[in-house]
């Protein structure tokens, strides 16, 4: 394969404690640690492994978003991507807008494989890969737990985690694949590679340069925190547990 594109998103770090804004319009991200979406790290790791196995010549990381999203592209470069593409926009991004921009890049750069995370942990949409494949008219395999490519045959064989088991698909390339948790364990960027990544190229461009706008089709009405969990009680015996379930919780 000549090229693999990987979409990486800047999101609130999975360890960060998030707070809902007072007016319930969204999450307060001021002073919150931001990182690469964990499923995107997995997608990127898979692409880098393909390059290490000499199954692709180039790995390109793509992000769409604010200026600071460059940090996540640098992480991608430190993990092994050869170059980055940053579509710069301050607009609020919805999956269809992201998919349209990624589709425009796919048409321009012609990857054999477009890897994405199955889901971004901020919006929890799980839409973008599917929409991208639909827009391009390419085959897709979502929730991948194993990816094997055969550049000679021009195919990928992907094992998917589906309810109740595993499904294996063979796809004609070019194709879209989204990563599940068990696809691999992403590497940490080492210090020498972080230094090297500073010299790798990042192309910056606007949505307009790709012939796209970033329309808003959805309106968030309300974001609420889950209800606070009430404290548990420790019971002394099974008899007491049964008694409480019967008389207090009234579930028996
Ligand atoms: P979602 O459909 O929003 O859950 O996101 C699924 C995947 O789409 C992510 O794991 C990324 O690979 C990709 N993606 C979503 N938004 C962006 C973005 N702003 N920039 C780059 N990739 C994105």
Image (cartoon, grey):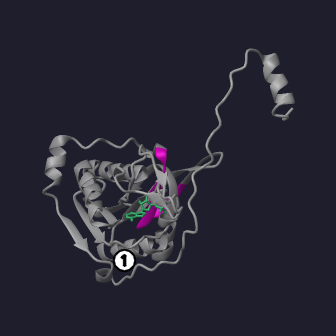
Q: Is residue 168 above or below residue 171?
A: above
Front-lying residue, 74 or 242: 242
Front-lying residue, 106 or 166: 106
Name which residue lies at 43% across and 70% down: 93
Look at the image and say whether residue 172 sits in the magenta stretch. yes
**Residue 140 percent location from the top left of the image:** 50, 64
Asked which secondary structure carries label 1, the reply is helix
Residue placed furthest toward the front:
22
Give the number of marks: 1
Name which residue lies at 64% across and 32% down: 231
Name which residue lies at 58% across and 69% down: 221
Query: For the residue with label 1, is its CB less than 8 Å from the closest atom of ligand 1?
Result: no
**Residue 191 percent location from the top left of the image:** 18, 41
The magenta span reads: 169-181
The quadrant of the rendering that contains the C terminus is top right
**Residue 250 percent location from the top left of the image:** 85, 34
Look at the image and say whether residue 198 sits in the magenta stretch. no
Residue identifier under label 1 = 104
Quarter of image, res 66 = bottom left
Residue 239 in the figure: left or right of residue 41 = right
Residue 110 in the figure: left or right of residue 183 = left
Front-lying residue, 71 or 233: 233
Q: Is residue 14 above or below residue 115?
A: above
Residue placed furthest toward the top:
236
Residue 124 in the figure: left or right of residue 83 = right
Q: Residues within 10 Å of mark 1 (few under 14, many from 20)?
A: some
Name which residue lies at 47% across and 46% down: 181
In the image, ligand 1 is in what quadrant? bottom left
**Residue 164 percent location from the top left of the image:** 66, 45
Q: Is residue 122 above or below residue 101?
A: above
The quadrant of the rendering that contains the N terminus is bottom left
Q: What's the magenta bit mostly, secondary-structure-wise?
A: strand
């Amino acid at each position: 394969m000549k090229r693999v594109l990987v979409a990486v998103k800047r999101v609130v770090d999975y360890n960060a404690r998030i707070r809902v804004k007072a007016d319930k319009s969204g999450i307060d991200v001021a002073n919150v640690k931001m990182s690469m979406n964990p499923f995107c790290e997995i997608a990127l790791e898979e692409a880098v492994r393909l390059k290490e196995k000499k199954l692709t010549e180039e790995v390109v990381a793509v992000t769409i978003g604010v200026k600071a999203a460059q940090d996540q592209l640098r992480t991608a470069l430190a993990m092994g991507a050869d170059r980055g593409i940053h579509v710069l926009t301050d607009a609020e991004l919805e999956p269809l807008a992201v998919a349209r921009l990624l589709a425009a890049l796919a048409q321009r750069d012609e990857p054999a494989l477009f890897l994405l995370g199955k889901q971004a942990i901020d919006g929890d949409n799980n839409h973008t890969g599917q929409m991208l494949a639909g827009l391009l008219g390419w085959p897709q395999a979502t929730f991948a737990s194993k990816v094997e490519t055969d550049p000679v045959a021009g195919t990928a064989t992907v094992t998917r985690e589906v309810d109740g088991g595993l499904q294996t698909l063979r796809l004609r390339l070019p194709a879209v694949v989204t990563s599940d948790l068990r696809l691999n364990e992403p590497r940490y960027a080492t210090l020498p590679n972080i230094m090297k990544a500073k010299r790798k190229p990042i192309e910056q461009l606007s949505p307009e340069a790709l012939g796209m706008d970033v329309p808003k089709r959805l309106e968030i009405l309300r974001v609420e925190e889950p209800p606070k969990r009430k404290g548990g009680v420790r019971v002394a015996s099974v008899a007491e547990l049964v008694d409480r379930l019967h008389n207090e919780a009234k579930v028996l």
